[in-house]
Image: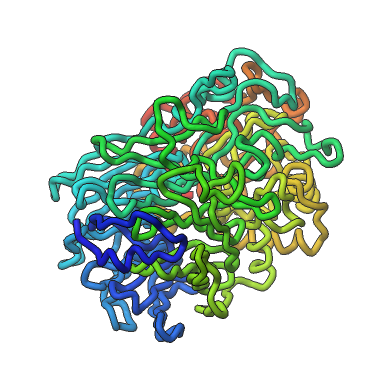
């Protein structure tokens, strides 16, 4: 651990702190998260802009952009090593860019896995750790790569779970915690042997703890919807409520290294109330409104921003979470951690879409950046109640509006300023102290423009609509969700929703030519894109009937969402993949999955309807069949089928293959299935 100048650290500007004592700051603590980072002396701010493929360098004293470096496609995150070397993950380029301080060009571009995101530098500066969303060998799992910063070569690559995303180093770099984005969980890795890393723990009991059986009998441990014994009538929202963490985008450490915090999105797993088959509910009702715990200040919808605390003093990080059904800490936990659901202090100002976060140098305050509500929430990082609370039921002390689509934050090492990057309008917001007795922050000066738009004007407008949980056209304060609340990053969330029509997995919209694949929805009940969007926005999200211009803008952005990167696409097929391509035709898969979008847009019954359990497919849905989904990018969209019952592609192919109802698969061997999966991962 290293000691910081504590006199400066006690002068943090978010609040006037009392009892400030000298303490140690771990070498693994980071003062930045997401798309921005600061040089070691805070003189330079580094910003990555995914649209433009650049690293912008800002002189913080002059508040000027002084240079930009062309990096790889779709740069995602940036960090700075102890020697002021800058590292950028290029999510669209399977690489990491390396830039030396003061240079205006890359020093190197290091190949890594598929869609690299999170990164961290060891305290001694000798190792760069990079989290890959997938590997070059498999679309079904990601990995952690260790790079020697001296030679810029990979030492090793360790396979992890599905869609890993953020990383935090622990115990002076002897361990690492890696977040699983869609599963909302954490993997612990032992790094004590520099050449032989090991996965210590593949997950935690986070979701079980968040769904403890409550004293009222309302809570329950999460389980698959279709596995419950007593069916509920369509549209019912009575009975047990359960919640699941998703979208665990990052992990951040407290300065003393004793705790980790993970921004998440909490989602309902139990049945939702509403109409069946696209019929409008009663005026003023919304399927996504109501049911979220902890009062109206939470937004009242079925999706809510959250923050999970992990105690790192055990062998592996231990989740410390509330019982979400009762909205309070369980009896065995002391309430000296933030609430697990972060409610807004204002009913009219939602808080949604946590995308980045950082703890200030004192360890007392946490800054949570919310991409879908365009604001930054400041809350205590070590308690939930007391005189510092801004409103009943909300731990947030201050909520600051920033620009559109914020996705990164960096704090100066004296705690006096914060820089936030607003990705959708390509600007930097500077937050600084007001100077009064309370020490509240405000946005200083005009926002600094970093770059211009590369998307079409229609797609630019559509992106803001798609990601907005505050635009009254898209949602209402009582619901406060965006399209991206379910379609994380415009993709899927790995979640199965309990709709009145039946269990429905969120489909990916990325790179699937979505607007050209009418009819729309799992049941194909909407022949026109505008009808589908209006029904979703008005009847579910609490928004308004959409006019043609708004529909066109949303459609333009959806068509511009890049497909997930794929190590196999556009590469010569391997022998296994070539055999799989032949089997795809032999099994008649191309009968329904045809054309450039790999769907013939017709409804079929492939034997997967849910006819028993707590949530069954509606009779009208069974009669109509299910709309054939596109297979573009299918290898990165687990789980599979409309009810999410197949965790892997192979599991789907093996289940019911003898019936020939989902392709002519009865005669295929297990080896054939492996080849077919290998081919599907190339699509």
In the rendered image, residue 570, in percent from the top left (x then y), is placed at 43, 58
User: The N terminus is located in which quarter?
Assistant: bottom left
Q: Is residue 101 left or right of residue 72?
A: left
In the rendered image, residue 544, in percent from the top left (x then y), is placed at 80, 52
Does the image show residue 579? no
Q: Where, by quadrant of the figure, is residue 97 drawn?
A: bottom left
Residue at point 15% right, 45% down?
Answer: 192
Q: Where, by quadrant of the figure, is residue 535 drawn?
A: top right
Depth check: 385 or 109 in front?
385
Total numbered badges shown on the rendered structure: 0
Depth check: 388 or 355 in front?
388
Question: Among all residues in the image, which is located at the extreme top?
Answer: 229
Q: Vertically, is 351 above or below 316? A: below
Residue at point 78% right, 47% down?
Answer: 538
Residue at point 45% right, 83% down?
Answer: 63
In the rendered image, residue 503, in percent from the top left (x then y), is placed at 63, 30
Q: Is residue 227 left or right of residue 88?
A: right
Does the image show residue 186? yes
Q: Vertically, is 641 above or below 151? A: above
Residue at point 58% right, 53% down?
Answer: 490
Depth check: 643 or 44 in front?
44
Q: Is residue 258 left or right of residue 35?
A: left
In the rendered image, residue 585, in percent from the top left (x then y), is placed at 52, 40
């Amino acid at each position: 651990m290293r000691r910081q100048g504590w006199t400066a650290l006690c002068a943090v500007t978010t609040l006037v702190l009392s009892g400030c004592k000298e303490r140690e700051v771990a070498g693994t603590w980071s003062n930045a998260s997401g798309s921005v980072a600061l040089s070691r002396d805070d003189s330079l701010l580094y910003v990555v802009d995914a649209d433009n493929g650049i690293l912008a360098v800002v002189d913080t004293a002059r508040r000027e952009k002084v240079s930009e470096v062309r990096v790889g496609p779709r740069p995602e995150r940036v960090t700075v090593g102890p020697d002021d070397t800058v590292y950028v993950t290029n999510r669209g380029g399977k690489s990491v860019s390396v830039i030396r301080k003061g240079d205006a060009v890359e020093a190197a571009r290091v190949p890594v896995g598929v869609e690299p995101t999170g990164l961290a530098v060891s305290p001694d500066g000798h190792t760069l750790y990079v989290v890959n969303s997938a590997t070059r060998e498999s679309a079904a799992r990601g990995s952690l790569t260790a790079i020697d910063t001296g030679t810029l070569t990979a030492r090793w690559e360790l396979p992890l779970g599905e869609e890993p995303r953020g990383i935090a180093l622990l115990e002076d770099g002897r361990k690492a915690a890696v977040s699983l984005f869609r599963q909302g969980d954490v993997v612990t890795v032992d790094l004590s042997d520099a050449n032989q890393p090991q996965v210590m723990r593949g997950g935690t009991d986070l979701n079980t703890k968040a769904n403890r059986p409550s004293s009222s009998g309302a809570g329950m441990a999460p389980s698959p919807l279709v596995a419950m014994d007593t069916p509920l009538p369509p549209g019912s929202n009575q009975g047990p409520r359960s919640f699941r963490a998703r979208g665990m985008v990052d992990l951040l450490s407290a300065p003393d290294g004793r705790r980790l915090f993970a921004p998440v999105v909490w989602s309902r797993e139990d049945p939702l109330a509403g109409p069946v088959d696209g019929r409008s509910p009663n005026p003023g009702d919304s399927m996504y409104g109501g049911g979220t715990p902890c009062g109206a200040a939470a937004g009242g919808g079925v999706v809510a921003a959250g923050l999970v605390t992990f105690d790192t003093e055990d062998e592996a990080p231990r989740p410390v979470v509330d019982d979400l059904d009762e909205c309070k800490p369980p009896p065995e936990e002391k309430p000296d951690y933030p609430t697990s659901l972060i409610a807004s202090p204002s009913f009219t100002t939602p808080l949604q879409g946590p995308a980045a976060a950082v703890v200030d140098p004192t360890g007392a305050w946490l800054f949570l950046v919310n991409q879908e509500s365009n604001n930054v929430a400041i809350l205590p990082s070590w308690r939930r109640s007391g005189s510092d609370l801004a409103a009943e039921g909300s731990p947030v002390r201050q909520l600051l509006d920033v620009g559109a689509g914020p996705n990164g934050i960096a704090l100066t090492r004296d705690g006096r300023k914060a820089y936030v990057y607003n990705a959708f309008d390509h600007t930097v917001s500077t937050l600084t102290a007001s100077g009064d007795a309370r020490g509240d922050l405000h946005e200083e000066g005009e926002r600094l423009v970093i770059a211009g738009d590369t998307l079409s004007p229609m797609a630019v407008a559509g992106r803001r609509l798609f990601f907005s949980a505050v635009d009254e056209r898209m949602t209402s304060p009582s619901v406060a969700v965006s399209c991206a609340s379910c379609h994380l990053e415009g993709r899927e969330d790995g979640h199965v929703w309990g709709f009145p029509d039946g269990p429905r997995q969120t489909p990916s919209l990325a790179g699937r030519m979505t607007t050209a694949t009418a009819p729309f929805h799992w049941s194909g009940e909407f022949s026109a894109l505008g009808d589908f969007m209006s029904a979703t926005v008005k009847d579910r999200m609490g928004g308004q009937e959409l006019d043609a211009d708004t529909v066109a803008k949303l459609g333009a952005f959806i068509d511009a969402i890049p497909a997930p990167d794929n190590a196999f696409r556009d590469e010569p097929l391997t022998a296994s993949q070539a055999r799989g391509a032949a089997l795809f035709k032999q099994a008649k898969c191309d009968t329904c999955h045809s054309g450039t979008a790999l769907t013939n847009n017709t409804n079929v019954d492939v034997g997967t309807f849910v006819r028993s359990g707590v949530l069954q497919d509606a009779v009208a849905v069974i009669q109509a069949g299910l709309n054939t989904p596109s297979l573009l990018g299918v290898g990165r969209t687990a789980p599979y089928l409309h009810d999410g019952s197949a965790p892997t592609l192979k599991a789907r192919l093996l289940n019911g293959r003898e019936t020939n109802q989902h392709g002519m698969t009865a005669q295929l061997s297990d080896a054939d299935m492996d080849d077919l999966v290998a081919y599907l991962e190339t699509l």
